[in-house]
Image (spheres, rainbow, N blue to C red):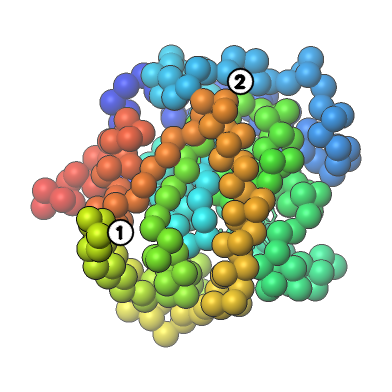
Amino acid sequence: MAVFSRCSTAATAAAKPTAAAAATFSYLIRALSPSFSSSSSTLDPETDLNRNKPAALGVLKREPKGRNVQWVFLGCPGVGKGTYASRLSNLLGVPHIATGDLVRDELASSGSLSSQLKEIVNQGKLVSDEIIIDLLSKRLEMGEAKGESGFILDGFPRTVRQAEILEGVTDIDLVINLKLREEALLAKCLGRRICSECGGNYNVASIDIKADNGRPGMYMAPLPPPPQCASKLITRPDDTEEVVKQRLRIYQAMTRPVEDFYRSRGKLLEFDLPGGIPESWSKLLRALNLEDHDDKQSAAA
Ligand SMILES: Nc1ncnc2c1ncn2[C@@H]1O[C@H](COP(=O)(O)OP(=O)(O)O)[C@@H](O)[C@H]1O
């Protein structure tokens, strides 16, 4: 999915970082770094880069501002944030940064944080804002050193405080709020499988919700692994029924208010997933005013 084009003069998504982008990134890294006070009240409004807030979703109609997109994905566990964020990241040439992956990388390491994090994550609880911001700062710093610019954040911000900190240091262009019928969320999490070698995400769940009381039915086919991954699949330790239900409760309590935070700033794009990837991807692209040449070609083949 290397080739992409935008149908409008939306926020630019050129793969090459610009000087403005690099400056924004450096600022973001410095501001998010651990030496940065944990209190959002220390943000300096004079140096806040968030000066030209777009009105409502006019963000997609704006002239390019000389840097790559800075988007956020919101949505309940199991909704498919990682899947769609990763596809958009390939299409737009910006990094997909999932804080859940950063946490899992830390867990897999023998670092001192690892055992502390394990207990929190395996109980479905949120890691502290300070730890997450530290992990995110390091990831951004590493990306900047490689010349990355722009991002699609997945799993951050997850609390209003995280959203305030992010708002204090950079301008988020758009927040895509993915929504899926509740009946499907638990099944999607329980069916999730990851290839322990390549990290690919697959799903063994076959979701078939019958039409009921005027509500249409919904079918989501499994997403099987390719043969080379089939024998290497693992399940995330926090994808058990009890822990997923806890994560869903925590989403309602801690992350639902983040939707309101961005809604009130006119940045939230609500997107109801109509089904699995075949039904949803092209609709999502249309909602974002994007086009995927490769997808069109494979559909036409
Ligand atoms: N922004 C964040 N703030 C706090 N904890 C986080 C954050 N992102 C990830 N985590 C931790 O990592 C776990 C896995 O995150 P993720 O893969 O995004 O899960 P989900 O499938 O629930 O969206 C979370 O349950 C939480 O413990």
* Residue 170: quarter of image: top right
State the mark number for residue 286: none
| Most foreground residue, 200 or 218 | 218
| Most foreground residue, 97 or 118 | 118
Which tag, 1 or 2, sits closer to the chain's start? 2
Residue projecting furthest to the bottom: 231
| Most foreground residue, 127 or 169 | 127
State the mark number for residue 20: 2
| 147 sits left or right of 219 in the view | right
Circle 2 crowding by C-alpha within 10 Å: few under 14, some 14–19, many from 20:
few
Circle 1 crowding by C-alpha within 10 Å: few under 14, some 14–19, many from 20:
some
Residue found at x 81% / y 69%: 116
State the image coordinates of residue 92 (x, y, percent, origin top left): 41, 37
State the CA–CA distance, disc 1 to disc 2.
37 Å
| 141 sits left or right of 21 in the view | right
Circle 1 sits in a helix, a strand or a loop, which is it?
loop
Q: Which residue is mark 1?
A: 276
Residue found at x 69% / y 41%: 160
Residue projecting furthest to the left: 301
| 147 sits left or right of 123 in the view | left
* Residue 222: quarter of image: bottom left
- Amino acid at dot 2: Ala
Residue 161, visible in the rendered structure: yes
